[in-house]
Amino acid sequence: MERFTISIDEELAREFDELIARRGYSNRSEAIRDLLRSHLENARLGSKDGAYCVANLSYVFNHHERELAERLTELQHGHHDLTVATMHAHLDHDNCLESVILKGPTQQVRAFADALVAERGVRYGQVNLVSVEMDQGRHSHGYAPRGKGAPHLHLKPRN
């Protein structure tokens, strides 16, 4: 592990310590590592290094909105190559929360997530993207004879 020292003014340090306490970090180092990872990930997603991603899109909608549930389902079927799974939860008599797991080229995933959230009647939509390296694996996972694994895709989050 590499060490480095930074200097910040007292007010910024105080605010940072308050944030650390609210989020439950045990020390400043853990919080700084998370902040750096987040900042580097945002930069990566905007560059060619973030070409592929996995993502979680969550949104709330009123299921009484005319044909909205059907439109959302049709959009997901139309992008079955990006949609991995959907979880649907009933919040009350009117509102539902859906979480959609996505994977694929970052620009396509982002555009699809934007299209879902832009549907009339969808509220509070937000997407969280994580860039991944795509690795074509050909090995056994214990359920095939050694060395006889079928080609498959591994999505490895970047550090």
Image: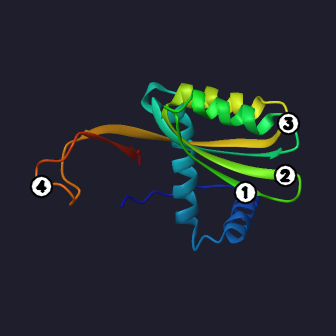
Q: Are marks 2 and 1 in contact (CB under 8 Å)?
A: no
- Placement of 89 over or under 135, stated as above or below: below
Q: Do the residues labelled 1 and 4 touch (CB within 8 Å)?
A: no
Label 4 secondary element: loop
What distance separates the C-alpha of mark 1 from that of mark 4? 40 Å
Residue 91 location, x and y as percent? Answer: 81, 59
The structure residue drawn at horizontal position 77% and vertical position 59%, both measured from the top left corner, is: 11
The structure residue drawn at horizontal position 56% and vertical position 47%, both measured from the top left corner, is: 38
Residue 7 left/right relative to 92: left
- Placement of 8 over or under 122, stated as above or below: below
Label 1 secondary element: strand
The structure residue drawn at horizontal position 86% and vertical position 59%, both measured from the top left corner, is: 92
The structure residue drawn at horizontal position 41% and vertical position 48%, both measured from the top left corner, is: 159
Residue 89: mark: 1
The amino acid type, in three-letter code, at marker 3 is Gly
Which sits earlier in the primary sequence, circle 3 or circle 1? Answer: 1
* Quadrant holding the N terminus: bottom left
Which sits earlier in the primary sequence, circle 3 or circle 4? Answer: 3
Q: How crowded is mark 3: few (under 14 residues within 10 Å), some or many (20 or more)?
A: some
What distance separates the C-alpha of mark 2 from that of mark 1? 9 Å
What distance separates the C-alpha of mark 3 from that of mark 1? 16 Å
